Amino acid sequence: MHRPQVRTASRSALSAHRPIRALALAVAAAGWLTIVSGSARAQADDKPAAKPAAPSAPAKLEYMGSETCAMCHEDLAKAFQKNPHRLVDTDKKYKHPAQACEACHGPSSKHEDSMNAADIRNPAKLPAAEADRICLSCHLNAPTHVGRISGSHAKNEVSCVSCHSIHKGPEAMVARKPADINHLCATCHRDVWASFQRPYKHRLPESAMSCVDCHNPHGSLLPHSLQLVEANEPACVKCHGDKRGPFPFAHAPMQLEGCTACHEPHGSANPRMLTRARVYFVCLECHANLSQPTPVANGTMGAVPPAFHDLRNPRFQNCTVCHQKIHGSYVSQDFLK
Ligand code: HEC
Ligand code: HEC
Ligand code: HEC
Ligand code: HEC
Ligand code: HEC
Ligand code: HEC
Ligand code: HEC
Ligand code: HEC
Ligand code: HEC
Ligand code: HEC
């Protein structure tokens, strides 16, 4: 839980500065006060005005270029030569030629004079929405980000820099190996990770798969930020293609609730990752075994097993011995083959 702590700490640091800022502003220009205090965001952007030492008009900030940073941040600048963001220096498309560092850190003239950490923008210390705005100035419209607005990371202020560290090497920039991704996600989602320790589960602890096989961390158009396959099917059918259909005789819950009507996708104490310990308990949640004669309109969802299903007889408890094609069938309305 290292990362969110950083965010929280920085937020309280920000608010600690607020009274000072307000004071400085009051001295500077009363007219500004109404504008700036109306928005905490604007205050955070307003670093120059925030310094009580400079109550007069704030000095205009200027871009100094990436090379000047290297004078003092030598190691970091050297390592940056291997960073994909190096492209910002060389490709005019990103609107900051030779200013890659400042594309994220903002104009640095004041910082280079003062050499004070407080005079330069550090995305990791900003509120999530502001940090994201910096990143999205270039990363908007990427296909991976289609569902971001509805995804709960954006809503819950989990910012880009919670998952992507710019200067700590390629693995920290983007986790690509399943083990690294799972570790990243598990730092916050401990309860989810715990369900992968159950006996029947997808093999994430063995690093054969990762969370992003099923979820898009940037959000998606499906609930739970599930990955989309092809048009708008959930990720499951990418690997379990035989369950995809379309089946002439489809089992209704496949289309309605989907796989999680019967399976626990992360892991389960039950064989086949079912939601219940025995197969027929799963079935009977929807197909009630009512006493005979079966009422016609019984109000339960789905059909009631016909009379010859004697559930006291163990033979009939193994529903899927007869109803083999439980996910859908090409030939049998009752999924018998
Ligand atoms: C003249 C020297 C000098 C130059 C030039 C310089 N810095 Fe710094 N920078 C410093 C010092 C000193 C610190 C403070 C280090 C500390 O407090 O540990 C610092 C800290 C930082 C921090 C950390 C801020 C924080 O919140 O912790 C960032 C980010 C930064 N510099 C970015 C840049 C960028 C980008 C450039 C070029 C545009 C640049 N610096 C140019 C000396 C310099
Ligand atoms: C793509 C955005 C981006 C670019 C480009 C970028 N930085 Fe950073 N920088 C960050 C973020 C985000 C952090 C916070 C720590 C992290 O995520 O690694 C940071 C942190 C820092 C720090 C604080 C030390 C630390 O590791 O926490 C310094 C100093 C710094 N950057 C300097 C630079 C310099 C110099 C350049 C150009 C050579 C540069 N940055 C380019 C985003 C960027
Ligand atoms: C000024 C434009 C710009 C800004 C701002 C920017 N990026 Fe990038 N980013 C790029 C470019 C250019 C690349 C490399 C080319 C590409 O992959 O499209 C890149 C690549 C990446 C990658 C993929 C790296 C890889 O190995 O595939 C990640 C992750 C990333 N950026 C995260 C961030 C984050 C997080 C921020 C905000 C702190 C940010 N970027 C801000 C331009 C930018
Ligand atoms: C909850 C963690 C998380 C958050 C928040 C997050 N990312 Fe990512 N991002 C990842 C992971 C994990 C990958 C690797 C995905 C993969 O390999 O399929 C990735 C991949 C990327 C890539 C590489 C391109 C690609 O799709 O392969 C870029 C660029 C990127 N993210 C940018 C961003 C930006 C910009 C933000 C903020 C708006 C952001 N990310 C927020 C976890 C996150
Ligand atoms: C910095 C902490 C943090 C990290 C790292 C993180 N998450 Fe989250 N995630 C959250 C928070 C906070 C929420 C919203 C509250 C909740 O549902 O638990 C959330 C929600 C989710 C949800 C529910 C989505 C929805 O839209 O309903 C999914 C799925 C998810 N995260 C997947 C991931 C994956 C996959 C990764 C790794 C790539 C990851 N998370 C990394 C904090 C994090
Ligand atoms: C096999 C596909 C799959 C994998 C792998 C997977 N998930 Fe999920 N996850 C789902 C599905 C499907 C749901 C929706 C569950 C539902 O509808 O009840 C979900 C729901 C969630 C939720 C929101 C509901 C909840 O249970 O809290 C979070 C958070 C989440 N997953 C995080 C993760 C993380 C973190 C990982 C990796 C450690 C992960 N998932 C791996 C398929 C998967
Ligand atoms: C990246 C590929 C992949 C994705 C995506 C995936 N699975 Fe799986 N699934 C597997 C593999 C491989 C197994 C084999 C079991 C193992 O790994 O031990 C498996 C096993 C299962 C099993 C247990 C089968 C058994 O014989 O015990 C169920 C149930 C299951 N998956 C359901 C789902 C559901 C539901 C989803 C979507 C939420 C999903 N899977 C997404 C690869 C995947
Ligand atoms: C109506 C309940 C139900 C739904 C919905 C459902 N399953 Fe199943 N699934 C079962 C049952 C019951 C079994 C165990 C069959 C047995 O007894 O062998 C099973 C077994 C499996 C197996 C392992 C055996 C095999 O046939 O490969 C996988 C994999 C699987 N399901 C994936 C999925 C996926 C993926 C989805 C969604 C597309 C899904 N299931 C939806 C009830 C369901
Ligand atoms: C989430 C609810 C749900 C679960 C769980 C479920 N079913 Fe169904 N099932 C339905 C619905 C709804 C229908 C459609 C009924 C209709 O068309 O009248 C249906 C239809 C059927 C049919 C075909 C009925 C017909 O009208 O031809 C059979 C056979 C069947 N289910 C067997 C099973 C078995 C066996 C299980 C357990 C492995 C099971 N179902 C689990 C909801 C469920
Ligand atoms: C010994 C084989 C067998 C077992 C075990 C079995 N069924 Fe059936 N089931 C059938 C046959 C055969 C039919 C088709 C009857 C017909 O078409 O008249 C059927 C039909 C159904 C129907 C469809 C009724 C309709 O209206 O068309 C449902 C629902 C059903 N079974 C549910 C179950 C459930 C739930 C279980 C487990 C508790 C189960 N079955 C166990 C053989 C079996």
Image (cartoon, helix red, strand yellow):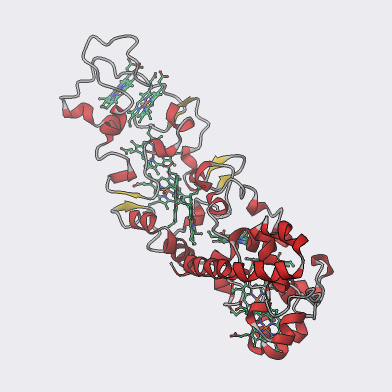
Residue 318 left/right relative to 26:
left
Q: How many marks?
A: 0
Q: Quadrant of residue 299?
A: top left
Residue 172 left/right relative to 264:
right
Query: In the rendered view, would you say 39 is above or below 54?
Result: above
Residue 85 left/right relative to 128:
right
Horizontal and vertical percent for residue 234? 52, 42
Q: Residue at x 24, y 32 (%)?
A: 318
- Find the residue positioned furthest to the right: 92
Q: Residue at x 49, y 48 (%)?
A: 239
User: In which quadrant will I find the C terminus?
Assistant: top left
Query: Is residue 104 at least partly visible in the picture?
Result: no
Query: Ligand 9: which quarter?
Result: top left
Q: Residue at x 58, y 66 (%)?
A: 161
Horizontal and vertical percent for residue 301? 37, 21
User: In which quadrant will I find the N terminus?
Assistant: bottom left
Horizontal and vertical percent for residue 124? 59, 70
Query: In the rendered view, would you say 84 is above or below 218?
Result: below
Q: Residue at x 67, y 73 (%)?
A: 121
Q: Quadrant of residue 205?
A: bottom left
Query: Is residue 295 at least partly visible in the picture?
Result: yes
Horizontal and vertical percent for residue 78? 67, 86
